[in-house]
Amino acid sequence: MTAFAFDVAMAALGVNGPEDETLDWDTIGWPVHEENVRRLRGRIFKASKAQDLATVRNLQKMMLRSWSNTLLSVRQVTQRNAGRGTAGWTGRSR
């Protein structure tokens, strides 16, 4: 992914990244961001099991504003889903 495409994807999400650094898609430490998101998902799960709805809601808001979650979401859409067909399309003729 080019830097321009990355900037366009981030702008489409309405997300501003760190202003003091320019990000290169290939130099992002993906395992660090995956761990951050995994840890936050675990916290949401534990709060949900404990039925602490206020904490669940706060953690969900934190997840929505998380830079790590945004990066992983953009990567999911741009790389992992690349080449897949249209949603709901099975390839069968009618």
Image (spheres, rainbow, N blue to C red):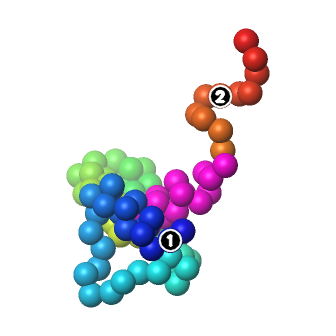
Residue found at x 62% / y 57%: 80
At mark 1, the secondary structure is loop
At mark 2, the secondary structure is loop
Q: Position of residue 74 (x, y in %)?
A: 46, 60
Q: Position of residue 55 (x, y in %)?
A: 27, 57
Q: Which residue is mark 2?
A: 89
Residue found at x 25% / y 81%: 19
**In the drawing, does residue 14 fall left or right of residue 81?**
left
Please identify the quadrant where the N terminus is shown.
bottom right
Q: Position of residue 82 (x, y in %)?
A: 62, 53
Q: Quadrant of residue 30?
A: bottom right
Q: Amino acid at mark 1?
A: Thr
Which region shows up in magenta? 70-83
Q: Which is the main secondary structure of the residues drawn in magenta?
A: helix
Q: Amino acid at mark 2?
A: Trp
Between 57 and 91, the one nearer to me in the picture: 91
Q: Which residue is mark 1?
A: 2
Please identify the quadrant where the C terminus is shown.
top right
